[in-house]
Image (cartoon, rainbow, N blue to C red):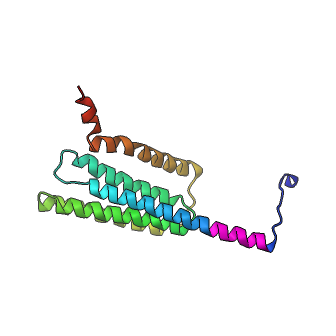
Amino acid sequence: GTEDVRTVALSDDEDTQLERRSRVANKYLTGLFMAAVGIVVVGAIVAVRPGTHYFGGELALAIIATAVLVLRGRSLTDRVHAITFFVGAFVLLAGFTLVTVRGADDAASALAVTLTVILVLLGAAVAGLLLPGKKLSPITLRRIEQLEFLLILSIAPLALWVIGAYSALRNLN
């Protein structure tokens, strides 16, 4: 019942101090998120090198990182934090697209990559217009969360493969 809930009365000074500390903590968290997103974006873009043996894995790593940034941003309640993740995903998408198009062997490959990215961006724009305000069922939200966890889990093994760690371990004598 209501008797289980305790209230704590704060003086105006304590309340002001708590608000100030809360704002400072939020700014620190924003900085950490910006740094983490920046590292993910730069790392994923630098990892994409067209024409290499691991290009498929490098591209998959960049796509998965983009999806993780979008899904993580979706779950954040603070708008600045969410926008940080969404902007990071957009920059990552644009970055690996540019790297891939510039390194494409022929015009058809470059056009295919560009059209695919345009379709993804259009799909994201449509989702951004239609989904806000829609209530998703708890089961759907749980499935989205599970997909996000699987994508996060897939990053480490994929990154180890891209950097050649498995090959190096296999060739140890």
Residue at 37% across, 51% down: 64
Q: Nearer the viewer, residue 124 or 22?
A: 22
Please give left or right for residue 86 compared with residue 141 in the image: left
Q: Is residue 12 above or below residue 105?
A: below
Whether residue 131 is visible to the viewer of this picture, yes or no, is: no
Residue at point 18%, 63% (across, down): 102
**Depth check: 173 or 49 in front?**
173
Name the spot of residue 131 as percent of width and height, x first.
Answer: 50, 64
How many numbered callouts? 0
Inspect the magenta stretch and tell me whether residue 21 lies in it: yes
In the rendered image, the residue lying farthest to the left is: 106
Task: Locate residue 4 relative to residue 164 in the image: left or right.
Answer: right
Q: For the point 82% across and 71% down, which residue is it?
A: 11
Magenta range is 13-23
| Figure check: 101 above or below 50 | below
In terms of secondary structure, what is the magenta stretch mainly?
A: helix
Relative to 76, 125 lies left or right: left
Residue drawn 32% across and 41% down?
160
Q: Position of residue 169 (x, y in %)?
A: 28, 32
Q: Quadrant of residue 157?
A: top left
Q: Looking at the image, can residue 51 be seen?
A: yes
Q: Does the magenta run of residues contain 15?
A: yes
Residue at the top extreme of this rendering: 173
- The quarter in which the C terminus is drawn is top left
Which corner quadrant of the image does residue 168 belong to? top left
Residue 111: x %, y % from top left = 19, 63
Query: x and y percent of residue 56 in the render?
Result: 24, 47
